[in-house]
């Protein structure tokens, strides 16, 4: 079994059985589904993932958001400091259901925040 070092943590290169892989992925997804607030999710991610792992996930999602917004590879590289290979990898994921769900959640949150601010502005000016 080969191992490689990932920021103080060893990750096995041994292939898991399909059943074990499915169980682990289901458990991981269940944790996210069961966490109730953004602060709970942030606490879990802060404690469970390394800074590098969090940055990888956050930047990957950021690339997807910027691609959806029509930004060019050059703009994305400048904003997020990612390689064109990373952008290309995310571009290949853009039509997948999970990525589309995440982008829709972000768009919904941005819309709600925008309208909440507008409504609060209407009431605070009187």
Image (tube, rainbow, N blue to C red):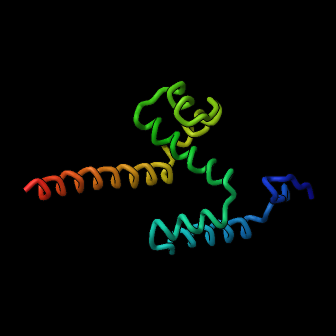
Whether 17 is drawn above or below 106: the answer is: below
- x%, y% of residue 101? 44, 54
Location of residue 11 with respect to 99 vertically, above or below = below
- Vertical placement of residue 125 versus 18, above or below: above
Using residue 51 as the reference point, say whether residue 77 is left or right of it.
left
Furthest toward the left, the residue is 126
| Residue ID at (78%, 65%) | 17
Quarter containing the N terminus = bottom right
For image coordinates 50% across by 73% down, the residue present is: 35
92 relative position to 68: left or right: right
**Percent coordinates x, y for residue 97 in the rendering:** 48, 51
Q: Quadrant of residue 112?
A: bottom left
Q: Is residue 35 above or below residue 2?
A: below
Q: Residue at x 67, y 61 (%)?
A: 49
Q: Nearer the viewer, residue 60 or 15?
A: 60
Instruction: Give coordinates of residue 33: x percent, y percent.
Output: 50, 70
Q: Is residue 93 left or right of residue 4?
A: left
Q: Is residue 57 left or right of residue 118?
A: right
Residue placed at 55% from the left, 29% from the top? 78
């Amino acid at each position: 079994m080969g191992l490689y070092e990932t920021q103080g943590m060893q990750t096995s290169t041994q292939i898991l059985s399909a059943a074990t892989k499915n169980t682990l992925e289901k458990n991981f997804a269940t944790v996210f589904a069961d966490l109730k607030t953004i602060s709970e999710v942030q606490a879990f991610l802060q404690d469970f993932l390394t800074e590098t792992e969090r940055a990888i996930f956050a930047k990957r999602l950021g690339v997807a958001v910027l691609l959806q917004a029509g930004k060019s590879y050059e703009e994305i590289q400048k904003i997020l400091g990612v390689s064109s290979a990373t952008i290309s990898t995310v571009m290949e994921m853009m039509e997948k259901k999970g990525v589309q769900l995440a982008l829709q959640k972000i768009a919904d949150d941005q819309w709600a925040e925008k309208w909440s601010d507008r409504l609060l502005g209407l009431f605070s000016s009187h």
